[in-house]
């Protein structure tokens, strides 16, 4: 798609399947660490948590739990399956990962306020950035050819 330009040749030399899988693993590990930080050390952001608790600001999940479950569960299963599919270089995994990522932009506003510590936010941002790199590589780098040639 991009021809044989300088960037394309640099990426093709650097991003081998193991490196691609490492980036996927780092993205997932950073997201899990982000979620775990505030769970293990809730005192990192007590002011934000108490403000949200005091004002009783709730999103879709608290207001409509059954509807939320009907929407969020398939989305989470699809997102997880997409990550596995991308890791295995499946064409369907690449598409599913892209669709679930785009869908997350439409779901997020309905989740309500979220309290993160600075550390958790930094880990989450790093994970999101790496996931963007995964999607970009899966579609616009030489590694994208693996998705076309592997078993579908």
Image (cartoon, grey):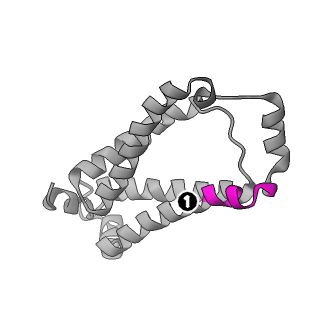
Which quarter shows the N terminus? bottom left
* Apparent side of residue 49 relative to residue 113 in the rendered image (left or right): right
Q: Residue furthest front?
A: 66
Disc 1 crowd rating (10 Å Cα; few below 14, some 14-19, many 20+) is some
Residue 116: x, y in percent? 71, 49
Chief SS of the magenta region: helix
Is residue 129 shown left or right of residue 98?
right
126 relative to 66, above or below: below
Judge whether 85 appears above or below 51 on screen: below
The one nearer the camera, 71 or 12, is 71
Examine the structure image and report whether residue 84 is included in the region drawn in magenta.
no
Which residue is drawn at the image coordinates 79% and 43% (left, top)? 49
* 109 up-or-down from 88: above or below: above
> Could you tell me which secondary element the residue under label 1 belongs to?
helix
Q: Does residue 28 lie above or below 13 as drawn?
A: above
Q: Is residue 16 visible?
A: no
> What residue is shown with label 1?
32
Please name the residue shown 85% across and 45% down the image: 47
Region of the chain picked out in magenta, as a range: 34-43
x, y (%) of residue 101?
A: 43, 43
């Amino acid at each position: 798609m991009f021809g044989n330009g300088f960037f394309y040749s640099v990426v093709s030399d650097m991003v081998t399947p193991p490196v691609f899988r490492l980036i996927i693993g780092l993205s997932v590990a950073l997201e899990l660490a982000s979620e775990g930080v505030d769970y293990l050390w809730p005192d990192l952001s007590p002011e934000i948590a108490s403000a949200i608790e005091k004002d009783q600001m709730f999103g879709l999940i608290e207001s409509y739990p059954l509807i939320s479950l009907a929407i969020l569960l398939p989305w989470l299963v699809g997102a997880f399956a997409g990550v596995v599919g991308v890791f295995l270089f499946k064409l369907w995994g690449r598409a599913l990962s892209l669709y679930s990522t785009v869908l997350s932009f439409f779901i997020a506003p309905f989740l309500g306020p979220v309290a993160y510590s600075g550390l958790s936010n930094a880990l989450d941002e790093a994970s999101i950035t790496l996931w963007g790199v995964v999607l970009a590589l899966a579609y616009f780098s030489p590694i994208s050819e693996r998705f076309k040639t592997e078993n579908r």
